[in-house]
Amino acid sequence: MTTGDELLLIAMVTIRRRVRIRDADRLRFALRAAELADLGRAGRIAVGPRRIEVTDPRPVEDRRLNNVLRGLDAADPPPGLKDWLRRTPRSLTVEYLSRLEDRKVVRVRRWRDAGGRTRHDIVFVDRSRRRELLDRLDAVVRRGPAGSPGERDLTLVALVQAAGLAPAVYPGLRGIGGRRRLSVLAAAGHLAPTTGGAGPAADEELADALVVGSHGLTVQLQGELGNLYADFTTGGHGLSHSADPGSWSDGGAGGTGHHGG
């Protein structure tokens, strides 16, 4: 699974015996950021102060990430990080839900309401798959920065924190300690940029982006998501009007389990 797939699975929580996606409208922006993080970690893109640069257009294994890579490569001029995230399609969360459905991780019932809008009821979630993911994330959080978390795990921690999904990993009063540790680890990402040398490049911005590496990209994504969510909450830049709360119903019976019970 990609980082986006894992992020969506983490976001699936059970409320009064119904499976819901926590903060689905906020989540879509984090899913878009996860795609950039995966492409950056694969060495296909670099994100500079002004634009996203495709450094290697060769395909990756995942079909959706390939489509994103082709879109970035075809963009003229190359998009900036802020604009790319703000143009996140409203359908992105549903698209990722279909990906998990194809992998038999979830089962979804679709129906139309009186207004003709398609609703999605999540009637089944593979609890063991979600538990394995939560256990992996919890092991990383418990070890903390001293555990030298891998780039993928650090990215996932940062996106979980930025998207407000910590309560989905560590719910309730019993999860307070875990949420604090997760927050500390997410903040530690700012202290650990990679400093490997970059090859010769005529564009200084691209050279700087290559030097920063994937940890630095995680920091950029985390910061930009924070700014975007602040606008989302306060109504700045009109983000709130693009949300689509009508896509989700109360869900169907099922269970995901919560880390820490």
Image: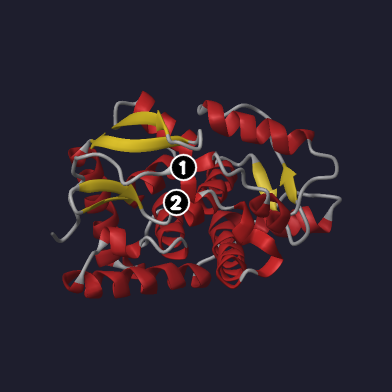
Left or right of residue 122, residue 52 in this image: right
Question: Residue 6 at what x, y percent from top left?
Answer: 37, 44
Q: Residue at x 37, y 62 (%)?
A: 148
Q: Secondary structure at mark 1?
A: helix
Residue 132 in view of the camera: yes
Residue 260's disc is none
Q: Nearer the viewer, residue 59 or 170?
A: 170
- Quadrant of the rendering where the C terminus is positioned: bottom left
Question: Alpha carbon of mark 1 to alpha carbon of mark 2: how far?
Answer: 9 Å
Label 1 close to label 2 by CB (< 8 Å): yes
Residue 1 in view of the camera: no
- Quadrant of the rendering where the N terminus is positioned: top left
Q: Nearer the viewer, residue 8 or 249?
A: 249
Residue placed furthest toward the front: 114
Left or right of residue 19, residue 97 in this image: right
Q: How is the image coloured?
A: secondary structure
Quarter of the image for residue 23 reads bottom left
Q: Residue at x 45, y 60 (%)?
A: 163
Q: Is residue 101 above or below residue 146?
A: above
Amino acid type for the residue under numbered disc 2: Ala
Q: Is residue 51 above or below residue 233?
A: above
**Residue assigned mark 1:** 247
Q: Nearer the viewer, residue 148 or 49?
A: 49
Amino acid type for the residue under numbered disc 1: Ser
Residue placed furthest toward the left: 261
- The tag earlier along the polypeptide, 1 or 2, is 2
